[in-house]
């Protein structure tokens, strides 16, 4: 949806967002079934929630292109709200899979991504929300070359340079490991509290290494020495 929406002019995107909102309003105000059994009520709640999520997508892309940070704040807040909704309506636990930048408590790029989903979820769920960050030293990853690309490519990631968080993590005696940052020893917590260059990979390929304080961003950290890009089925 992203590439398709962003190629449209702003008035078209806003019109489509208004239509999606109108559909949600119609479903909310006039779509409730007359039957009141539990299964019917549950089906209606899910239909309304799914329609809301679709409308949120259109609304997110209706932001002007020069309001990219506002678009991203709206997007991450919506993801948090939808996750919390699921938790309220379905008992149990949720595993929310996303990249580091979304699940973190602090943004590694505040100018463009002011407040990540993880910050919103912590505000809503408190300590019931526990996030996990992933770092690695080297290997290959799949990513789209740019905003207009339709197919990802495999990119090689060379070993982390000195001064990066990954450089130090990869010199611990364990090749691959996980650590609960909330209970790390004092010396480790002091090191984790300092922001250092850290690779950040998402949907698009980037060599940026924003300064990240791992201890302020995550509850648990998984570090891998080497990773391999998944095989893409064409």
Image (tube, grey):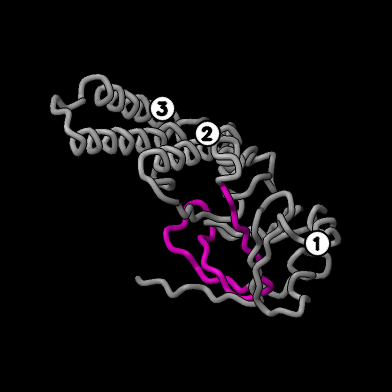
Q: Of marks 1 and 2, which one's residue comes earlier in the chain?
A: 2
Residue position marked by numbered label 1 in the rendering: 185
For the residues labelled 1 and 2, the Cα–Cα distance comes to 37 Å
Judging depth in this view, the residue of 87 and 154 nearest the camera is 87
Q: Of marks 3 and 2, which one's residue comes earlier in the chain?
A: 3
Neighbor class of circle 3 (other Cα within 10 Å; few <14, some 14-19, many 20+) is some
Residue at coordinates 69% horizontally, 41% vertically from top-left? 110
- The quadrant holding residue 185 is bottom right
- The quadrant holding residue 66 is top right
For the residues labelled 3 and 2, the Cα–Cα distance comes to 15 Å
Residue position marked by numbered label 3 in the rendering: 14
Residue at coordinates 20% horizontally, 25% vertically from top-left? 31
Q: At which x and y percent is residue 11?
A: 41, 26
- Which range is magenta? 129-156
Neighbor class of circle 2 (other Cα within 10 Å; few <14, some 14-19, many 20+) is many
**Residue 74, label in figure:** 2
- The quadrant holding residue 8 is top left
Marks 1 & 3, CB-CB < 8 Å contact: no
Judging depth in this view, the residue of 121 and 161 nearest the camera is 121
Q: At which x and y percent is residue 156?
A: 61, 74
Residue at coordinates 69% horizontally, 72% vertically from top-left? 137
Neighbor class of circle 1 (other Cα within 10 Å; few <14, some 14-19, many 20+) is few
Which SS class for mark 2?
helix
Marks 3 & 2, CB-CB < 8 Å contact: no
Callout in the foreground (1, 2)? 1
Callout in the foreground (3, 2)? 2
Which SS class for mark 3?
helix
């Amino acid at each position: 949806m992203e590439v398709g929406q962003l190629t449209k002019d702003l008035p078209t995107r806003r019109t489509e967002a208004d239509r999606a909102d109108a559909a949600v309003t119609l479903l909310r105000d006039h779509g409730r079934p007359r039957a009141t059994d539990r299964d019917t009520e549950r089906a209606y709640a899910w239909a309304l929630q799914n329609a809301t999520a679709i409308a949120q997508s259109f609304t997110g892309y209706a932001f002007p292109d020069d309001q990219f940070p506002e678009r991203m704040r709206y997007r991450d807040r919506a993801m948090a709200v939808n996750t919390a909704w699921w938790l309220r309506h379905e008992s149990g636990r949720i595993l929310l899979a996303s990249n580091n930048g979304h699940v973190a408590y602090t943004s590694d790029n505040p100018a463009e991504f002011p407040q990540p989903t993880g910050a919103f979820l912590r505000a809503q769920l408190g300590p019931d929300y526990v996030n996990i960050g992933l770092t690695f030293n080297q290997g290959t990853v799949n990513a789209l070359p740019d905003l207009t690309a339709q197919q990802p490519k495999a990119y090689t990631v060379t070993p982390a340079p000195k001064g990066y968080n990954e450089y130090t993590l990869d010199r611990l005696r364990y090749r691959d490991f996980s650590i609960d940052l909330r209970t790390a020893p004092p010396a480790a917590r002091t090191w984790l509290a300092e922001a250092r260059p850290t690779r950040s990979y998402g949907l698009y390929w980037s060599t940026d290494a924003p300064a990240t304080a791992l201890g302020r961003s995550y509850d648990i950290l998984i570090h891998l020495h080497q990773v391999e890009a998944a095989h893409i089925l064409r």
